Amino acid sequence: MIEYRDIHKSFDVPVLKGVDLTVEDGETLAIVGPSGTGKSVLLKTTIGLIVPDRGDVLIDGASVYAGGMRTLVRVRRQVGYVFQNAALFDSMTVYENLMQGVPDAVQKEIGRDEVLRRVCRALEDVNLDPHVVINKLPAELSGGMRKRVGLARTIVGRPRIILYDEPVTGLDPVNSAAVERLMTQISSRMGVTSLVVTHDIEGSFSYANRIALLDQGRVAFVGSPDEFRGSSRPIVRAFADRQSAAAASMRMMEDESHGGSSESWQSEIAAAARR
Ligand SMILES: Nc1ncnc2c1ncn2[C@@H]1O[C@H](COP(=O)(O)OP(=O)(O)OP(=O)(O)O)[C@@H](O)[C@H]1O
Ligand SMILES: [Mg+2]
């Protein structure tokens, strides 16, 4: 279980202004909210990449910050982090990048062959062919492939908790759906507790147990996908409507770039704006 208690964080201006949120064991919780509202900052406070000015983060009842660096190192071993921009090491091959996800002690214990087997398995899990990508450098891969390598690096370490920062942004619909299915599989097969920052609310309905809306530095709503869809709270409706209008306009641009008709998308945007 992860508990965020009264988390405050300011940079030049206040970003997080008292976030209270609990993620239950085995749960997948999606965090949505406007750009720049502090979603990534909140994820980073979980493992001390950003330290809150006030408040605390507890994992299984124990503060992440009370024990200094030793505690943080232990926490980071249990928590996998899928960064918004993949954050691969440019000078390392895919294989070497994935090795970073397997702690040294585990590498010694299981041996080279088993490490290689796990690396290949993790790549297959994210729909990449190990034979094709394993010796490539990140610069030789597409953005979507880099994203999937980042995800493979996280799961190869078999974490108990996974924090995903926009795991499907920039992926085509087929790969988005594959990553969403994968998140569901990982969470049920490995009993992982997951926190997923996403702009894709519709997609999150398929894998999230609950959805939290972060707005103006606080949690404005938290509830099941059905509760989110059915909520009449103005803040939820305003956000959901903006998102569906943006998603429709994105699809229209994709459609036009593929030479299709844009009429259906225009009416969809108009409909979304009216809702
Ligand atoms: N390390 C940092 N130093 C200074 N300011 C920061 C830092 N990290 C984040 N910020 C600021 O905090 C605010 C929230 O940033 P954050 O990246 O959490 O937004 P977000 O909700 O994840 O947005 P997006 O949906 O665009 O990814 C922004 O104004 C950002 O400039
Ligand atoms: Mg972000």
Image (cartoon, grey):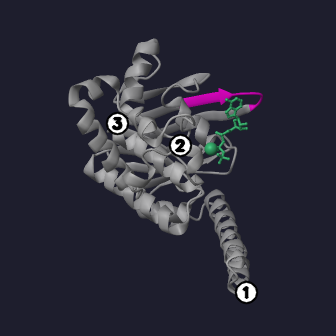
Q: Which is closer to the viewer, label 2 or label 3?
A: 2
User: Residue placed at 68% from the left, 62% from the top?
Assistant: 238
Give, as a three-letter code, the residue at label 2. Answer: Leu
Does the magenta portion include 12?
Answer: yes
Q: Is residue 248 rendered to the left or right of residue 77?
A: right
User: Residue placed at 72% from the left, 78% from the top?
Assistant: 256
The CA span between labels 3 and 1 is 47 Å
Q: Residues within 10 Å of mark 1 (few under 14, many from 20)?
A: few
Dot label at residue 137: 2
Give, as a three-letter code, the residue at label 3. Answer: Gly
The CA span between labels 2 and 1 is 42 Å
Q: Position of residue 257 (x, y in %)?
A: 71, 75
Identify the image quadrant of the C terminus.
Answer: bottom right
Chain-order first, disc 3 or disc 1:
3
Residue receiving disc 1: 263
Label 1: element kind: helix
Label 2: element kind: loop
Span highlighted in magenta in the image? 6-13
Q: Position of residue 171 (x, y in %)?
A: 56, 60
